[in-house]
C-alpha cells in the first residue's frame, strides 16, 4: 500500500504502519498511541477494514481531531452509516463478497476441469463516500 501511495502522491509521508488484527479495539489502541506521539501531524488514516477505522474515528473524535481523513475497507453497514453521518469515516471501500465467492468458484471449476485458471483474479472494489453512500445502500438492498 505504501508503494502505491508514494507512486501517486510523491509528497505523502507515512508516519506509522501496524497490524490491527481487524479489531475495533486494537484500531483504537493504536490510534490512541499515535495521537499521543504524532498529534496534529496525523492527516489521514487508512485501515484495512471498517472495524479498525471505526476504532480510529472514536479516538480521533475524543481527541478533537475531527478533520483527519479516515478510510476503511469492507463497506459494512456500520462503516457506511459512519460515512453517511459526515462525522465519522470519510470513506470505505466495498469489496463485493458475492463477486469474490463466485470468482473463487469459477476458478475452482476451471482448475478441477484441467483448464487454465489465472491465479491472480481481480474483483473490482468500489469507493463509498458521503456523495454516493445513499445510492450504494439502496443498490445493496435490492440484492
Image: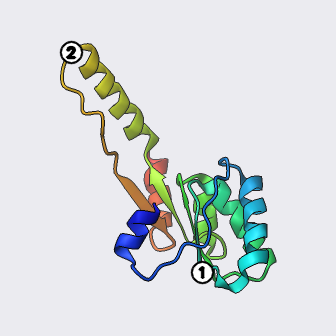
Q: CA distance from mark 2 to mark 1?
A: 50 Å
Q: Is residue 67 visible?
A: yes
Q: Residue at x 78, y 60 (%)?
A: 29
Q: Are discs 2 and 1 less than 8 Å apart at CB? A: no
- Name the residue carrying label 2: 114
Instruction: Using the image, determine if residue 73 lies above or below residue 120.
Output: below
- Name the residue carrying label 1: 43
Q: In terms of secondary structure, where does tag 1 sit?
A: loop
Instruction: Using the image, determine if residue 111 lies above or below residue 50.
Output: above
Question: Mark 1 or mark 2, which is nearer the start of the sequence?
Answer: 1
Residue 7, picture quadrant: bottom left
Mark 2 crowd level (few <14, some 14–19, many ≥20, 10 Å Cα)? few
Viewer-side residue, 84 vs 72: 72
Q: Residue at x 58, y 53 (%)?
A: 49
> Residue 84: where, in percent of width, then height?
58, 69
Give the total number of marks visible in the rendering: 2
> Residue 103: where, in percent of width, then height?
33, 34
Residue 44, picture quadrant: bottom right
Viewer-side residue, 71 vs 11: 11
> Residue 111: where, in percent of width, then height?
27, 20
State the quadrant of the N terminus.
Answer: bottom left
Would residue 92 appear left or right of 68 to someone viewing this image? left
Q: In terms of secondary structure, where does tag 2 sit?
A: loop
Amino acid at each position: 500500500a505504501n508503494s502505491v501511495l508514494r507512486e501517486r502522491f510523491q509528497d505523502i509521508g507515512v508516519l506509522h504502519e501496524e497490524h490491527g488484527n481487524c479489531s475495533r479495539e486494537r484500531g483504537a489502541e493504536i490510534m490512541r498511541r499515535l495521537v499521543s506521539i504524532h498529534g496534529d501531524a496525523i492527516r489521514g488514516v487508512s485501515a484495512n477494514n471498517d472495524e479498525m477505522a471505526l476504532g480510529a474515528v472514536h479516538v480521533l473524535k475524543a481527541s478533537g481531531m475531527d478533520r483527519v481523513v479516515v478510510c476503511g475497507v469492507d463497506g459494512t453497514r456500520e462503516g457506511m452509516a459512519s460515512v453517511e453521518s459526515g462525522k465519522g469515516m470519510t470513506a470505505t471501500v466495498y469489496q463485493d463478497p458475492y463477486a469474490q465467492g463466485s470468482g473463487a468458484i469459477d476458478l475452482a471449476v476451471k482448475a478441477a476441469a484441467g483448464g487454465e485458471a489465472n491465479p491472480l483474479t481481480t474483483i473490482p472494489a468500489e469507493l463509498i463516500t458521503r456523495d454516493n453512500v445513499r445510492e450504494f445502500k439502496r443498490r445493496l438492498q435490492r440484492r
